[in-house]
Amino acid sequence: MRGHSPRKRSSRYARRLTCHDLGLTASTEPRASQAAHSRAVAATDRGASPLGGRLPAGRLLEGTVLTLLAGLAASLPVIASTVKGLGEGLTPTGDRAIIATRAYDVFSSHTPLVGQYSASTVLYSHIVHSLGPMLYWLIALPSRFGSATTPDVVIAAVNVLAIFATVALARRRGGVPLMLATAGTLALMCNSFSPETLHDIWNPSAGLLPFTLLLFVSWSLACGEYRLLPAGIVLASFAAQCELVFLLPSVGVLAVGVFGLLTHAAGRAKAWPWWIAALVAGLACWSAPIVNELTSHPGNLTLAAEAALSHGPTLGLTAGWRAVVHAIGIPPWWLQSPSNPFGRAGDVRSPASALATISCLVILCGLLIVGMAGLRRRRRDVPAAAMIGLLLCLSLAAVTSSNPTRPSLIPSLGYTLWFGSAAGMWVWLTIGWSIATLYGVRLRRPAPAGASRARALAGRAPAAGIALGLLAVLAVGTAVALGEGRDQDGDEYKPVKTVNAAIEHALGPSDRVVLVLGAHDFTAFDFRAAVVYDLRRRGIRVYDPAASVRLGSWYEPGKHNVDATVYVYDETRPPMHGRVIAKVSYGVRPHHTITVMVARARRASG
């Protein structure tokens, strides 16, 4: 057999590498050839030439630098929302202050073993919480040792890292085109949330972008990336413990990844240390809920299971189908700017448009078609991505349809359906990438002999396309960042700081035990919770009987001695006696006035 010259083999290999790096390599290539391509792509990402030596300076943009730039462009909405929040005087109020207080308690004798208070508690005789305290663990140090804004900065940093990791995994799975498409769609998806969601420590917000990263980690697991198994366990645990609504989709997509990993022939002998690491990570993540389950009767895991299985009348399958239609039908949730952060609760209670319904059916059929086509072509990645998309749609329908019809719980759909943006984004990406990788054509063809100028232009075309794609992602990220408005609770930031400063000035050095009382409406609750967190940060023992259902029994006053009592009311004349130390107003429609009083007492009881 006549051999090929080294020069011809190198030229042919370079052309095949380019097509593979673009994610459009023909599926009929031998497996050994695909493995060689993967090694060459990895070398290219490190800035090395697959043929030896270093890449020219102009091609460094195709390596790690390109991934970093794409991740940065996609992260611009998160960075901008955090900077704007800090400029508005960001400070935790309401449930956010409760979360910060519980995070402060991590390094104490009453460390939390469960997650945030659940609104479904109103249906049962026991208090139900989210599944675990991993969110508290994440912000424990900044809540105790940083400023009041540090926890939000940490969440923003985690979200940025999640975006960078998502973009990097997208490149590993589908080359530069999928990476740039993922970066652009991530930036667009950020536009479907209110600005504070991107840096918020509130549990429904904190799990969104880590959950999005979990989708790509699970997909990579299904493709044989066994080293990502511990990361998948941690991400799924974190999302599920942040908010109950993430449990079903997290378990579903991780199951796809684990199943694909178990059936993957390559690397089985080398994977066992990573299975052990995943087991250890899982035990660490769920250690606190397990302790709670063993020491409490009934435990929170038992209560959460009962809440999931017996919740009375629900919205039903019609609402569940509408959620899927709004998530992936035209226009999908992930491409819509929210006029109301909680408006999705209304979307699923009214009929969707004909365009949304028909397009949803077409897209679902498309998922099934590309999944089966991938199976016929023996592609593991395509059917795995399609299965993740279908499971996300089923999870979205199940979560919505099982929501109780009790009026006080209907508004909770406004934030439980936020993960519909990630689900819709994934489905659209899967359809587009699957069609391109299964039915697309190679973007480079060998130039005719003697056509040196044509070959030169062909060589520049991919680089020019990459540059244009990166500029498009940068433009999208910048547009979303510049279009962000104020934080939803921005009007409360300055008044809350005024109240906290007044209380600090009114309390003396000997006032180390303080009872906090006040009105029970949401407005007063926002301020009262902020007061509790600020007092805890200053090392003061705090009792708050109204908030103890959220904070735990350690905050119940009983008959303990207190040095002072703080009253927080949204009335001009509170029904208590004491010295008025602050009166703040905020908002326009309606106009709110908060009055704060301090009463000195040697002994008080709740």
Image (tube, grey):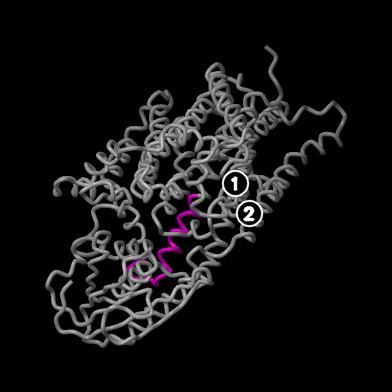
Point 55% across, 16% down: residue: 376
Point 33% across, 51% down: residue: 119
- Are the residues flagged by discs 1 and 2 in contact, CB closer than 8 Å? yes
Which x, y percent locates residue 139? 36, 61
Q: Main secondary structure of the magenta part?
A: helix
Which x, y percent locates residue 317? 43, 31
Q: Residue 296: tell me if it is visible.
A: yes
Point 24% across, 63% down: residue: 548
Residue type (three-letter) at the residue carrying disc 1: Ala
Q: Name the residue under label 1.
A: 183
Label 2 CA crowd tier, 10 Å (few <14, some 14–19, many 20+): many
Which element type, helix, strand or loop, lies under badge 2?
Answer: helix
Relative to residue 278, is residue 195 depicted above or below? below
Q: Name the residue under label 2.
A: 477
**109 or 26: nearer the viewer:** 109
Query: Image quadrant for the C terminus?
Result: bottom left
* For residue 294, side relative to residue 518 (left or right): left
Residue type (three-letter) at the residue carrying disc 2: Gly
Label 1 CA crowd tier, 10 Å (few <14, some 14–19, many 20+): many
Q: What stretch is highlighted in magenta?
A: 142-162
